[in-house]
Amino acid sequence: MTSTRDAALHPRGAAVLRAVVRPRSSKRTPSPPGFILLVSVMLFVPIQPAAAHPQCLDFEPPFKPKWHLEFCTQYEEFGCCDQKTDNTIAERYWDIIDQLEIAGLELCAEMLKEVMCQECSPYAAHLFDAEDPYTAVRELPGLCFGYCSEFHGKCRHVLKYLTENRLLRGTSERDMSTFCTMVDLSDQDYCYPNVLKSPGLSRNLGQVVEDHRGCLQLCLTEVANNLRNPVLMLHSGDGTHRMFIAEQVGFVWVYLRDGSRLEQPFLDLSGEVMTTPWLGDERGFLGMAFHPKYRDNGRFFIYYSIQVNSKLEKIRISEMKVSASDMNMADPYSERVILEIEEPAANHNGGQLLFGLDGCLYIFTGDGGKAGDPFGKYGNSQNKSALLGKVLRIDVDGSDPGGQQYRIPPDNPFLGDVDARPEVFAYGVRNMWRCSVDRGDPVSRYGRGRIFCGDVGQNRYEEIDIIVKGGNFGWRAKEGFECYDLKLCHNSSLNDVLPIFAYSHHVGKSVTGGYVYRGCESPNLNGLYIFADFMSGRIMALEEDRTTESWKEKSVCMGEKKTCSFPGLINHHHKFIISFAEDEAGELYFLATAYPSAISPSGTVFKFMDPSRRSPPGKCKQKPLPVKVRGKKFPFVPMELTVLDTNEKPTRPPPRKFKLTTKPPVTSSHIEPTTTRTMTPGATVKLKSPAKEAKKKNKLKPWKKDKMLNKQQAKKNTLRQKTKKQSKKPAATKPVVVRNKIKLKKNLNATESLDALKSSNGLRDNKIHTKRKIPLRNAAQKQTGLKIKEPATQFMNDTKTHLNVKNNQTTRNQLKVKN
């Protein structure tokens, strides 16, 4: 067996063919219930390093279907087909079976189903050798030699319905060995049915991929670009799913759901914000938060640097409102200053604003700058009477009688301490850069409301903290888990809250806090806290162990070329990761730049994509409220190079078409012809309406509909019993015997079957008009294990037949073939 690392790469082998079909092994693979159980167990196996990467034929990751599959049931726990695709495969399958019956050929129904259902396999891209965008997709999946020889012996006559490749069809008629060599794959782990049995492939089925270094491989999509040091991106929580991106220079831009940007900025404070073009300058527009009831009151809050009289520097927290006439513009005259704090140095300006689940506004300030918090005997951070180096908590929905523009929440921890400011909620922080509120597990709600922060370190360590009411987070006594100021560190009254994680400066030198992923599109990432380092550009993740209440690091890296070979995905980003963001649906983003200057337009926004599995189609769809746009919109134009050019993307091939070689039997059904169905470029099947007399004769009144259907069902049952007896008679029996297609194949050859169909009027004169596919499905059901409910109507409704079905009319339809 190849190494698990190489197994993730696309098997180069015989690339002569390619197309669309899907299998499951007959005797060599587990039964459908056994396979489903096997896949269910595999989905809960812990992630191991160097796992192989499952892919689907249409280059979308596998998923658990939202609804159960009726046909390829063995892949309903985890695979590549939704209900619509499953129905399409089933329709093609029954069309092929019908043609085999007409020609009097062996049905080989079970193996045919196995081969066709491989389109639903999570390894379809490997089975069909579809990873290479410069080659065609196989028309047959890779079949292991042993299975292929059995398939060739039983089912080679069905190949003309599965492929139009002349070389493949010709070879199958002459030489089994050559044919099976062409169909086989060089990597035996991926040929069918080996692909279902290899533990190296199945142990991590549907899990986030780890490479040989133990790195979780993720891919990205580009969302926005040409931004000047984008410091934050957030949504307004008003149901519009707009995103607001703030630049350090003081502009806030509106991005719509389609990726376009509005011409006019939502907010322009470039004339007020203090910033410089110096590389790495930390001053500027730094924070923003929308009120929890923004949809109703239009209030939001901002945090930025100012300079007074060209000398004194401050940070300012203000309230503003949206314009009454334009939902995409702030009212420039609505600013109300809530709080200003003097900054003794140019660095460590903090900058995070957020609302907790309690409705209060949390403000995260830096320690004042310079190095080692040199302000006062213990520094600003350990001084509860200073507002710097703190987590502040205020109520912005009212004013204080003393003239303050906010109220102090009555449960603030130091409200009665004369040596502490009442706004202080936690202290001992150095310079927390980017904090977030955990939405909680989508099902259990575990973790909801926790506030995670990344606190930038001094010389040795960076740390991640969970904010605790009244907590002392140690700075400047401690840096990470280690002592920084020995005297303060050994003080028995320190009683500091330890970080949940810290890393040394060998890894990175400036932490950028992130989010706990709680979105829908990448369920494998649920519960992971994802963050990064600004200087090294390294992305990391933490996974919680709830039994030990500890957090374990998981390295995150960009996926390899094959891992991210889906249209529109990229596997690289700019080095300097400034901030993380979460959209209204909970999907995760980060903002990065190639040159960390406030005037450099190299900022880009990236969205995380898990290449191993997305959620089922339709599950994560959102219905945003309409956005009234008054000005121009600039459409999004991606600039980053994708791994796979969208112009070269491989796609799921169309269903294989085949030519009808004989005239099908005249059938009766509840079908009114309305369309033309194309079978091959040269052949179409047109449906004509029956004579008016037949319409009148068979027309049902609405109130007789149910009664007539019950009578028809009773007659069908009688017909089936007669068919069983007649199938033992010679070919001269009534043509209705042909309706029992599977059992008749042993008694009639192809010529006799056609003669019986042409010479007999039994079907036309029979008053019981049944669908020609129904008896076959009932008989084949025993072989294929299919469960079809109400075959007379349900199957036609679930599959795409391009026909209008009417239950209140029983007519005869005549098929004509044009060659």
Image (cartoon, grey):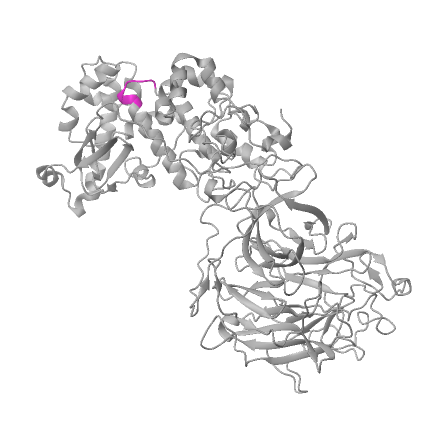
From the viewer's side, name the closer residue of 675 and 247. Answer: 247
Q: For residue 460, which quarter of the picture? A: bottom right
Q: Is residue 689 left or right of residue 571?
A: left
At x 29%, y 17%, the residue is 745
Name the residue at the left extreme.
693
**Is residue 441 something that shows in the picture?**
yes
Where the N terminus falls, by quadrant? top right
On screen, residue 507 versus residue 129, left or right, reads right
Query: Along the line of sight, which residue is nearer the eye, 498 or 722?
Result: 498
In the picture, which quadrant includes the C terminus?
Answer: top left
Name the residue nearer the viewer: 636 or 767: 636
Q: Is residue 102 magenta?
A: yes
Q: Quadrant of residue 497?
A: bottom right
Q: Position of residue 474 (x, y in %)?
A: 81, 63
Residue displayed at 61% across by 63% down: 228
Question: x and y percent of residue 222 in the render?
Answer: 55, 52
Q: Position of residue 446 (x, y in %)?
A: 62, 55
646 over 37 or under it: above or below: below
- The magenta region covers 100-106
In magenta stretch: residue 412? no
Q: Compared to 740, does 274 lie above or below?
A: below
For the image shown, how many numbered marks are present on the structure?
A: 0
Question: Is 246 in front, or is 188?
Answer: 246
Left/right placement of residue 218 relative to residue 138 reads right
Figure quadrant of residue 535: bottom right
Furthest residue in direction bottom, as rendered: 402
Determine if residue 445 is in view. Answer: no
